[in-house]
Image: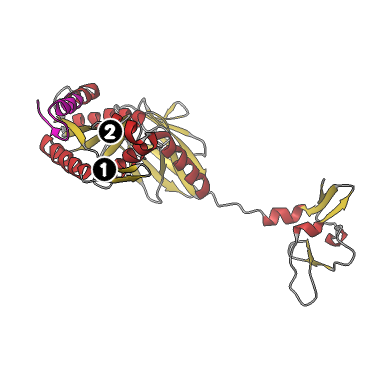
Amino acid sequence: MLRLLAPDRDPKQARLPKDMPVEAEESTGVGFARSEGQRPEFKLADAFEHVDEESTALVSLESLGRLAHTEPKDRHLLVRVKGAGLGQVTRLKDQPCYVGRAPDSGLFVGDTGVSRKHAMLIPDGETYVLIDTESANGTFVAGQRVTRHVLKDGDVVQFASTAAFRYTQTDSSQEALLRQLFEASVTDALTGAFNRDYFDTQLAAELSYARRHKAELSLIMFDVDFFKRVNDTYGHQAGDQVLSQIARTVTNMIRTEDVFARYGGEEFALILRAVNVAGAHSLGERLRQAVEELEVVTERGRIRVTISAGCATTNGSDESTPQDLVRDADRRLYAAKHGGRNRVLAEG
């Protein structure tokens, strides 16, 4: 049983052993047990008296309030609640920033219908002011179109028809948790690469960006050769180690803006913004060589594997769809396999 001691109660009334001296710390109102010549030391066990197997503790409500630690809610976040990158967290800076499709936007939103300079977010004391900068398709808060709005914690802000965010004022711990939840939702647990859902979303978004800016976009699809043989010979745990090591190797060789995903099974994909067909083929070759030189040490032995890859590219001026890019890259991947494996094809 837990008994709460009111702030005006003497902490010396706590049930302590009769031979244990007690002092009250004035700053907290907590009773301390101490031995001669020692500083007061709080012992939780000393606050209990055992009577018929029932434990009783006297706790000061005032003390609990003073000891409780609350982090300051000094983080201003926009959390994506609709559209590409669902759950993604953006921390707002202490300076004005544009929201839009422009590459230099403080908050880049590449959704169709969002203007290049769609809106502005301006710090204003403990919050931010949202200003629509004459966007074509509007800025909305709680479903109502606005030109200027002082944000409140919990406001849902939408730019055009698909890009919606929740404005949240929170602390560093909550921000870290939100980021962890987002990472878990878009990451393949085994390899650390992005998962298939995230890949599909990002390929559509990157292709839309390439069309608007008439920019090149490339896709590499690669597959581990004879992977079933690895699983059959060394076991599935060893096969998992091979996939994880390949993923780490690739991650260390690509740019921050490249999207590396596990497409399914032993097949992976790379989305490369502003990379032409020659650049995609060159990167594919470097990856192929790195994997060929890789030796994976497992309990069942040392394993070496190779990969086959196919590339596809759009210059942003054609009518390619995400499905077209995947189909072309996949077709060349399987052509590489039929041509002897351990090779990269970017044409045909």
7 up-or-down from 344: above or below? below
Q: Determine crowd level at label 2: few under 14, some 14-19, many 20+ residues with C-alpha closer than 10 A.
A: many
Q: Are marks 1 and 2 in contact (CB under 8 Å)?
A: yes
Q: Mark 2 points at which residue?
A: 268
Of residues 184 and 284, the one drawn nearer to the viewer in this rendering:
284
Residue at the (80%, 59%) spot, across then down: 46
* Quadrant the C terminus occupies: top left
**Disc 1 crowd, CA 10 A, few/some/many (<14, 14-19, 20+):** some
**Looking at the rendering, which quadrant does residue 62 occupy?**
bottom right
Q: Is mark 2 on a helix, strand or loop?
A: strand
Q: In which quarter of the image is the N terminus?
A: top right
Q: In which quarter of the image is residue 289?
A: top left
- The disc placed on residue 22 is none
Q: Is residue 17 above or below residue 244?
A: below
Give the Cα distance between marks 1 and 2. Answer: 10 Å
In the image, is residue 176 above or below residue 46?
above
Give how far across and how far down residue 81 sits, in percent. 44, 31
36 in magenta: no
- x, y percentage for residue 337? 17, 28
Residue shown at the point (48%, 50%) measured from the top left: 125
Give the labeled residue for mark 1.
250
Percent across and percent down for residue 228 are 30, 29
Mark 1 belongs to which amino acid?
A: Val
Q: In which quarter of the image is residue 221?
A: top left
Viewer-side residue, 336 vs 166: 336
On whether residue 341 falls in the magenta region, the answer is yes
- Amino acid at the residue labelled 2: Phe
Q: Magenta segment range?
A: 329-348
> Is residue 111 visible to us here?
no
Q: Is residue 246 left or right of residue 324?
A: right
| Residue at left offset 85%, top offset 62% | 12
